[in-house]
Image (spheres, rainbow, N blue to C red):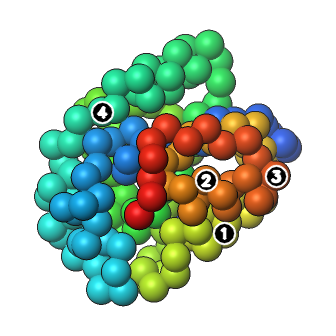
Amino acid sequence: MLQTSTSATPSTPCVVFDVDGTLAEFDAGSLGGLVHGEVKNWDAFHQAMAGAEVIAPVGMLLRRLRDSGEVIVICSGRPAGWSSHTEAWLAQNDLTYDAIYLRPDGLDAISDEEVKRQLLATMRRDGFEPWIVVDDRSSVVETWRAEGLVCLQCAAGDF
């Protein structure tokens, strides 16, 4: 799913940020079971994450990049059907962005790695060209890197 507040021109350079564990505090040990298995409980997950704190240094990085004129793209494994929850949390925490890409509905069984790979292809078709990515999960970081991107890993992310 894509929602933009500005249009991308061919090969618009952008910075990509993940949400959970990157911008939003996420305790994989206590909440991971809600969304990392084959059966996902998105109701409970979004209820728990609605009040999540921003990871201050990453939020500051996003805001400073945005203020300097960078195009910001959010890319999360959260389902598109729950976009309003994600958008509300981002707005509540003053994390503005130009586009948001979320897991297409009905693809809960696909790994986060594959979802991010598919969303990257969609971003590129839409005219965005990431020059750097910020993510936390080790396996997803490796996926970004395998796609030829520099990815800053902001947390251990071994889950």
The disc placed on residue 148 is 3
Secondary structure, mark 2, is helix
Identify which residue is drawn at 34% across, 80% down.
Answer: 37
**Tag 2 and tag 4, C-beta contact below 8 Å:** no
Mark 3 lies on a secondary structure that is: loop
- Percent coordinates x, y for residue 23 in the rendering: 39, 38
As shown in the figure, which amino acid type bears the numbered disc 3? Gly
Residue 54 is marked as: 4
Q: Is residue 147 above or below residue 95?
A: below
The mark lying in front, picked from 2 and 4, is: 2
Q: Name the disc covering residue 141, or none.
A: 2
Count neighbours of disc 2 (C-alpha within 10 A) and say few if under 14, some if 14 to 19, many if 20 or more. many
What secondary structure is marked by label 1?
helix
Q: Residue at x 29, y 79 (%)?
A: 40
Is the residue 148 above or below the residue 34 in the image? Answer: above
**Contact, mark 1 vs mark 3 (Cβ under 8 Å):** no
Give the labeled residue for mark 1.
118
Disc 1 residue type? Gln
Decide if residue 42 is on the left or right side of residue 87.
left
Q: Is residue 121 visible?
A: yes
In which quadrant is the C terminus drawn?
Answer: bottom left
Answer few, some or many: residues within 10 Å of disc 1's Cα (few below 14, many 20 plus, some between 14 and 19): few
The percent position of residue 38, horizontal first and vertical second, equals 36, 86
